[in-house]
Image (cartoon, grey):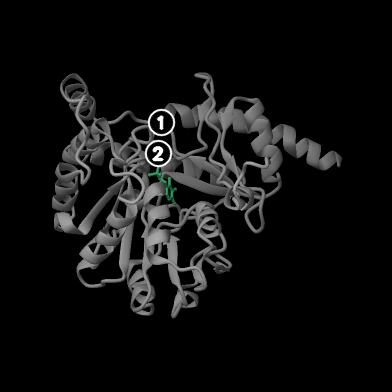
Amino acid sequence: MSKFWSTLTKRTEPYVPGEQIDNKNIIKLNTNENPYPPSPRVIEAIKWEMENNLQLYPSPTADPLREKIADYYQLKKENVFVGNGSDEILALSFMAFFEPGKTIRFPNVTYSFYPVYAKLFGIPYEEVPLNRDFSILVDAFYQSDGGVVFPNPNAPTGIYLELEHVVDIVENNPNQVVIVDEAYIDFSGGSAASLVHTYDNLLVVQTMSKSRSLAGLRIGFALGNANLMEALTRMKDSFNSYTLDRLAIAGAGAAISDNRYFLQTTEKIIQTREWVTEKLKRNGFTVLPSATNFIFASHYKCKAKPLYEKLKENNVLVRHFDKQPIENYLRITIGTDGEMDSFFRKLKLVIAEVSQRTIKI
Ligand SMILES: *Cc1c(COP(=O)(O)O)cnc(C)c1O
């Protein structure tokens, strides 16, 4: 702290992202990145842009990209907003749609950026407990005072909420915005994207960081009624006209266009997820049903914290949230088959070590 800090800076509690360690020997299963590189067409598009246009500002409205995303979801450009990662879009949405003085709701186990934004913008919030099976308690989100935000599938549980229940929440908040954060939707059931025609209070937020292998390029997008998009644009244009640079716009457009590559890599990750789930279960883990590119699992005997720590000593990074009621769960990103084989070899050693210590204590 310093005397130069504003009151806002002093009271801010920043989000802590998963560690990014620059070490090629580490098996990195802690931030839900895609283990496969982006489509080769992405690299070509970025190269072309780099060699031709970097002296020019990008399009402030990112029109060519918004058109591609709109086509993909059979929407209009006016129903699409793009941002520098979906985190930026979430922040803009909190500003654009939620109010200080009106309590919003999100699940008590969810993406830990939501309380950070709420505190930053002075928005009161209520954390709604999950059901015992970690699914979302749908009717607890009805008639909210200030709005609702939740990921579907939820993070870090990985559990998908059927669209009919998403609709229930949207229909029961007719005067508030319901933000559905679909960061992992491509690994699961259907998106709520097509529902934005029907519901003017539904905001669907997605990212290219996970299913499109572009975490490093920072691209997120929102889908919704044109009025909601206009609000987001007003917020964006009040602090930075060019949130997406030329390389990001070009690369993201190419990623959306290469549907075949996208389907191949997504399908591969889902296959790996299925065998990893089975193998974890055979090794004493309870595994929540994942509709994402990660798994949330708890060992019947070993506590999650020492497992996390020992795995790290063995160059395997997973994510552990030291918080009730998930303190005994590990979130494990799905890597390549080879990475998951190495993970299981290390896990076996670590479980042996940790369970021995548990008995001694
Ligand atoms: C990864 C993630 C995001 C952020 O994605 P970016 O586009 O990389 O900012 C948002 N919400 C959830 C639930 C996520 O897991």
Residue 336, which numbered label? 1
Q: Quadrant of the N terminus?
A: top right
Q: Is residue 358 left or right of residue 289?
A: right
- Name the residue located 21 percent from the left edge and 63 percent from the top edge: 226
Q: Is residue 41 left or right of residue 32?
A: left
Q: Position of residue 347 (x, y in %)?
A: 61, 33
- Name the residue located 19 percent from the left edge and 68 percent from the top edge: 197
Q: Secondary structure at mark 1?
A: loop
The span from disc 1 to disc 2 (Cα, nearest Å) is: 7 Å
Q: Nearer the viewer, mark 1 or mark 2?
A: 1
Q: Position of residue 336 (x, y in %)?
A: 41, 31
Q: Earlier in the sequence, mark 1 or mark 2?
A: 2
- Name the residue located 49 percent from the left edge and 69 percent from the top edge: 104
Q: Position of residue 140 (x, y in %)?
A: 50, 76
Tell me the residue that label 2 is attached to: 272
- Name the residue located 54 percent from the left edge and 62 percent from the top edge: 122
Q: Residues within 10 Å of mark 2 (few under 14, many from 20)?
A: some
Q: Amino acid at mark 2?
A: Thr
